[in-house]
Every structure is written in structure tokens, then in C-alpha cells.
Amino acid sequence: MSGREKSYLRRCLELFAATMEQHHGWRPDYAGLEEKLAPIRKGDRDFSYHDLEIIQDRRYWDFRQFWRFPDESEFHHEIDTAAATRMLRALPLDEAASITRLHEAFKSIQNVSVVLRFVHPEAYGIMSAPVEKVLEVRRGRTEVETYRNYLGDIRSLRDHHGLTRAADVDMALWVLEERVLASYKDHELLAGYRGDSFLHRLRAVNLLAGLADADDPLSLARATLEVHRGLAAALVSYAFERTLRRGGADERIKVADLLPLDAPSRGLRLRHALTDPERPVSRDEIMDLIELTEELERKQEETT
């Protein structure tokens, strides 16, 4: 990891309070809130609904600007405080089951994430739209699964960048979104972000994970055409060559006979053009090769 890559998220973290004040008009006191809830983590007292009132105290931040906790009677109807205390103290053990149960009680995954972030800042962060956007968080089948994907991302960034806590990553990424990705107004941080290959790789994996079911290269080429022409070109070129070579040299000759006389040579010209690093990638050429390859595959299926 380069010095620039190592330092820029730390700089984002240092700018968190000031950036929140600029953006929302109030300065957060997250450290004070962590201190108020530390006895729960340490086992010195039980969790109670009063802790939710502490979290909503405007001396620390304006929680109600973003979310709402269920009222006290509704909360106690869903879970007793003894059970909530046991789960909070045990985390991150039995994490999936505990977060699922807490989600039922708190009514939203954002509410759960707020509580976990202030009780266990070393392992948890607040799930918010700006940070989700930075990470391109993989969507799960449930809100809990999506949150756990998010936790995996911020924990891996915590470890890679040598930050102390997952909550620090959460705050740093919020600043990154506000000062860089949403505005490009901090060029020093922008340079650090551009050099962060670890974060870029994580974002790419998250984005492409949604295409995992589309394992056919032609489907992937269509899916990526509007966002990354170079990737779409590589995928369709591979698909065309694979189709042309299917069955070996003899089959390749047969395949050529399935199409109009100029089709195989036209496909080869298109593939060559799309993989030429000296020329821009053309959307029309990608679509031409996709359609030609699909026609070739259909003809192959008709003859088998």
C-alpha cells in the first residue's frame, strides 16, 4: 500500500466532524455517545430503552433527521431487554441470528446499525446511503444479509488501511462520498481515492457479483455495454472465438458454412477491431459482434 493510499482515509476520518457540520449544520459528538454506551459492551449494566433515548439526544447528533426508533411499548412487545443485552454483549458471535432478531425489534436495519455502531464501534458501522454508494454494497436477499455484506466490506477496509475500528471506516467513507465522489472538490483526497486499488477492486467485485447468475459471456457483454465498453468488447470477443472454435478445426469449417459467406470473416474483423488497443471501442461494433455471435450459436443449435 502506498503512502498516499495509506493516508487518505485517515485524512477523511479527521475531516468527519467538520464535514458533517458543513453538510448538516451541527457537529457530532460520537465519542461522547460511545462513552455513554460503553458500559453495555463492558458488561457493567444492561441495555434498556433509555439507551435509545440517549442515542437520540441532540447533544450528540441529530438522529431524528435520518431515522426513527419504534416507541417504547412497541419495542418491548418485540423483545425483552435481557435478551437484547445478551445479544449485544455476545456480538460478533452468532452475528447473523442476533442481527436478525434485533432487526425484528428495531424495525429497520439502519436502526440496528446505529445501535451496534455505538455499542461496538470496533466491529460495526452505520448503514447509510452515501457509504453504500461508495462501496456499491452487494444486495442480499434480506436487509440483514445486505448489512452483513456491508460489514464485510468496511472490516476488510479497516484491516487493509490499518484503521482501528470499523466505525472509523464508516465515517471516512462518508467524508469520501461528500467531499470527493459527490463533488470532486477535494483534489488531494481524490488523488488518494484514485490510487486506492484495494477499494476499487472491492467495488468492482460488488458490482459484478450482481451478474454472477449471467455466466454466459454474451449476456455479460450486453449487461456491461453501457457502463464499460472495454469489458463488453473483451467478453463478446471471447464469446465469438469460443463459438467459432467449438468442436475443433473441422467443426470450425462447418460453422463457417452455416452463415452468409462474409459472416465469419466479418466477425474476425470485428473481433480484431474491438481488441485493438490503438483505436477507440465502438458500441455499434460490439452490438454487431454480439448479434453475429448469437446468430452463429442459433445455427449451431439447429444443426445438432
Image: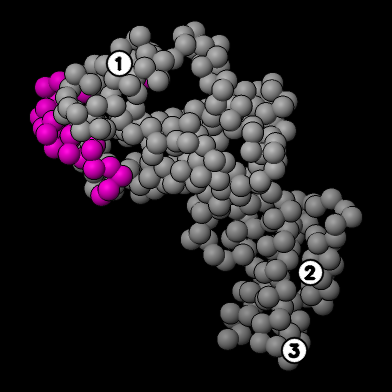
Mark number for residue 267?
2
Helix, strand or loop at label 3? It is helix
Q: Relative to the observer, which residue lies in front, 259 or 8?
A: 8
In the displayed structure, does residue 53 sit left or right of residue 225?
A: left
Q: Are marks 2 and 1 in contact (CB under 8 Å)?
A: no
Task: Tell me, yes or no, if residue 81 can be seen here.
Answer: yes
Q: Earlier in the sequence, mark 2 or mark 3?
A: 3
- Tell me which secondary structure the magenta stretch mostly adopts: helix
Mark 1 and mark 3: Cα distance apart in space: 71 Å
What SS does tag 1 mark? loop
Instruction: Calculate the distance from the C-alpha at mark 2 to the C-alpha at mark 3.
Output: 17 Å
The residue beneath circle 3 is: 249
Residue sitting at x 52%, y 37%: 163
Position of residue 195 measured from the top left corner of the image (x, y, whole percent): 70, 41
Three-letter code for the amino acid on which mark 1 is drawn: Gln
Question: Label for residue 96?
Answer: none
Q: Is residue 80 magenta?
A: yes
Q: Residues within 10 Å of mark 1 (few under 14, many from 20)?
A: some
On the rendered image, what quadrant is the C terminus found in?
bottom right
Q: Earlier in the sequence, mark 1 or mark 3?
A: 1
Magenta stretch, residue numbers: 65-94
- Write down the residue under mark 1: 56
Q: Nearer the viewer, mark 1 or mark 3?
A: 1
Residue at 55% x, 14% y: name it: 18
Looking at the rendered structure, the kind of residue marked 3 is Ala
Secondary structure beneath disc 2?
helix
Residue 167: name its quadrant.
top left
**Side of 246 where 72 appears, left or right:** left
Gap between marks 2 and 1, in whole Å?
A: 63 Å
The front one of 260 and 8 is 8
